[in-house]
Image: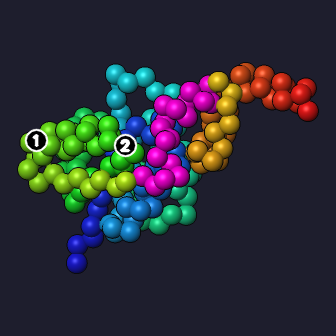
Amino acid sequence: MKQRLAIYPGSFDPATNGHLTIIHRALRLFDHVVVAVAQNARKGSLFSIDERQELLREALKGVPRVEVDSFRGLLVDYIRERKADAVIRGLRAVSDFEYEFQMANANRKLDPDFEAVFLMTGEDYFYISSQMVREVASLGGDVSGLVPVCVQRALMEKYPKRLTEIGRMKSKGS
């Protein structure tokens, strides 16, 4: 019997707890999930492709049937190369659906066998986006509970000065 393989593509800059929830839910539907970090030179990223992959591997350590990989170019080409059955996409809001619906149909035009499975984000994480996490962290805000611990540590390394200033202000006030 053929193993059902799903690809969960994204920039994951950085990975959030919302992403992890989608991965765990996808594992209920598929035998194997590949978390595929998209390499997009036009999109400025906080974390390098290698850093994003390593953070995902650390966050998913001990989770069976998950692989972290990266790809460049068209998603449909990567899907064909990996012989995947479907692409997983998480939806937070109606605006996500509109964008993902357009992308799924564009990909289906490129490859009629393309299948997308949309998973609604749970109520605990529907408001979280990587962009919001980056902004909160850059301003010294607390991102615990929004991202895995390894990502929180990595964000603190990216914004050490700002987080040190916030820590000093908190200790003076207490």
Residue 131 image offset from top left, x and y in percent: 48, 31
Magenta span covers which residues? 121-138
Q: Residues within 10 Å of mark 2 (few under 14, many from 20)?
A: few
Residue 126 in magenta stretch: yes
Rendered view: 49 above or below 17: above
Residue 37's image quarter? top left
- Badge 2 is on which residue? 93
Neighbours of disc 1 within 10 Å: few (<14), some (14-19), many (20+): some
Residue at (43%, 23%) from the top-left corner?
A: 44
Say whether residue 52 is visible: no
Q: Residue at x 26, y 56 (%)?
A: 117
Depth check, mark 1 against mark 2: the one in front is 2
- Identified at 77% across, 26% down, the residue is 166
- Callout 1: SS: helix
Could you tell whether 122 is left or right of 161 in the image?
A: left
Give the answer, above or below, for where 109 lies relative to 6.
Answer: above
Q: Is residue 60 magenta?
A: no
